[in-house]
Amino acid sequence: MPQYRHEWKHEINLADHLALRARLRAVCRTDGYAVGGNYQVRSLYFDTPSDKALREKVDGVNCREKFRLRYYNLEPALIHLEKKSKRDGLGTKVQAELTAAEAQSIVDGDLAWMPGSGRPLVRELYHKMRVQGLRPRTIVDYTREPYVYAPGNVRVTLDYNIRTGLGRTDFLNPDCPTIPAGEPVTILEVKWDGFLPDIIRDAVRLEGRRAAAFSKYAQCRIYGV
């Protein structure tokens, strides 16, 4: 059974970003996957013909889910299929590894291999592509600056340079063009298990900022219509 985690999101400006970076570096360690303090994230999100995932996010539906393919630093040696779920304000994520060929076959609509893949999440995506009409909808690119703190299993990220592939789905193509998804912003995300240590709560506190819903997928879809 996947564990649901607490999550805060804040949309912040450059001055906030720089202040938080200094504080977080003083109390956290950088995620081991980061090179030079950050890494590049590329995701390909799925949705139904009626935009079920997008509409549920915008409407704030209490129980919802979304599927995506994801890899890092434009290196397709390791690709994940991920399902993110939200319930009562808590979030969880399950994932399965894919080869580049498998990911490309999903993008191309070649699905016959999926039921026999031996991976429950791949079979679930297959079923929902068949029944709900889930299909790749848009690429989302951004830069992530990640920090971790062991007590509470805390993960703090600063995401910026958010870009949309509009309606493009060729996310394994490193030359796939993307454009900025609106005005430049940084998204602060804080995730933790049972408790959020005071040292982290103090480090991420910003006067006049409140936690608010923000979806990179929704933001990129706004600029993809």
Image: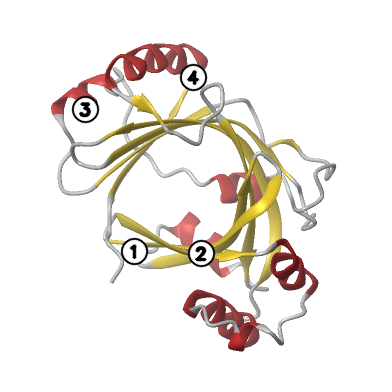
Question: Dot 1: within a 10 Å radius of its alpha carbon, few (fewer than 14), some, or many (20 or more) residues?
Answer: some
Q: Which residue is mark 4?
A: 13
Mark 2 or mark 4, which is nearer the start of the sequence? Answer: 4
Mark 3 or mark 1, which is nearer the start of the sequence? Answer: 1
Left or right: residue 92 versus residue 107 is left
Residue 203 position in % (x across, y down)? 26, 20
Mark 4 or mark 3, which is nearer the start of the sequence? Answer: 4
Q: Which residue is mark 2?
A: 66
Near-viewer residue (111 or 159): 111
Q: Secondary structure at mark 4?
A: loop
Q: Are dots 1 and 4 in contact, CB under 8 Å? A: no
Q: Secondary structure at mark 1?
A: loop
Left or right: residue 204 versus residue 30 is left
Q: Which residue is mark 1?
A: 62
Q: Which residue is mark 3?
A: 201
Q: Residue at x 21, y 21 (%)?
A: 202
The disc labelled 3 sits on which kind of residue? Arg
Residue 24 position in % (x across, y down)? 34, 20
The disc labelled 1 sits on which kind of residue? Asn
Q: CA distance from mark 3 to mark 4?
A: 19 Å
